[in-house]
Amino acid sequence: MTTLPGSVVTRFAPSPTGLLHIGHARAALIAAQAAGPNGKFLLRIEDIDQGRCRPEFTPAIFEDLAWLGLSWPEPVRRQAAHFADYEGPLQTLRARKLIYPCFCTRGDIRREIESAGHAPHRLQNQGPDGPIYPGTCRNLDPMEAAGRMKGCTPFAWRLDVARARSTVGELTWHDERAGTVNATPEIFGDVVLARKDTPTSYHLACTWDDALQGVTLVTRGEELFAATHVHRLLQALLGLPTPQYAHHGLISWPDGKKFSKSDRAITLRSLREAGHSADTVRRMALGELALPMASA
Ligand code: GLU
């Protein structure tokens, strides 16, 4: 994939877990607008979560985006078709002893946090994705870990974030609204880079693919702002370029309540079937027109 020097490459990267809704339309339109007429707008299907993603939603995404008036180059990258690609970066990190196998179940993690005298809901144990991993498997005896892996105990690969940080020093990234941001990936604790059920994770697959696809500007909703701290660390560890970031505000209901990802009330399909034109829906998505109903 070649890009003209200086031309902007953006992407919209939905997970096919349901029909696209007005919040997705906003993210897609902002990415396409940011690419502008001379840049490139990519579509990527982030379908690594085989439990939550459904194959029928991928063609529905294509159909809804085309109806909105968007176009993108083919082939569209579908992450689940490229699981082998994420083995290379994991191997690099493994060779540098920056990741370790973690055999803990959710229950183990909860019990460990509780036995350390902290309630899991207490603020200091909470990262942006939930309770911070207490580090149980970080110092597991390597022989013991190897034995469990051989014995087919399911395991995830976690990043030793303190060790990883110490190898790269201070890091910053740039967000269009926030300006220069100091990277603080430690707020997540030792994040999972390859899950028990999937040989990668959102953080690894997204960071790797943004670099692989030559994305120069990552636009996405502000709910993913914190994730960029981890992505910046992975870029430094793996020698990947750092794109610019523009985390945008989320769409609101007419009563001011933020529209959330789990809010399935306004799908593009239902708006289309209710007779709204693509132009009207585009304007709703960009906040130029109010949504046709209040939050539930
Ligand atoms: N696949 C993610 C989602 O649907 C978006 C990831 C991103 O834009 O970085 O929430």
Image (spheres, rainbow, N blue to C red):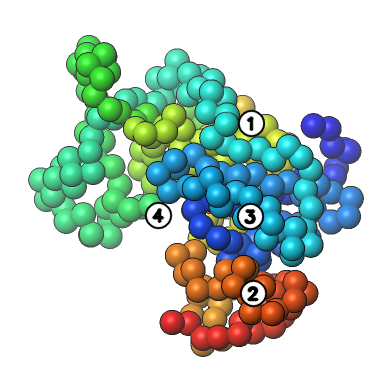
Structural distance between the alpha carbons of marks 4 and 1: 24 Å
The foreground one among 239 and 281 is: 281
Q: Which residue is mark 1?
A: 240
Q: Amino acid at mark 1?
A: Leu
Q: Which residue is mark 4?
A: 128
**Closer mark to the observer between disc 2 and disc 4:** 2
First of labels 3, 1 by sequence position: 3
Q: Which residue is mark 3?
A: 61
Number of the label disc, if any, that sits on residue 44: none
**Closer mark to the observer between disc 3 and disc 4:** 3
x, y percentage for residue 72?
77, 48
x, y percentage for residue 53?
48, 47
Q: Residue at x 88, y 38 (%)?
A: 4
Structural distance between the alpha carbons of marks 2 and 4: 36 Å
Image quadrant where one finds the N terminus: top right
Q: Residue at x 79, y 62 (%)?
A: 69
Residues at marks 3 and 1 touching, judged by CB atoms closer than 8 Å:
no
Q: Amino acid at mark 3?
A: Ile
The foreground one among 261 and 67 is: 67
The foreground one among 15 and 241 is: 15
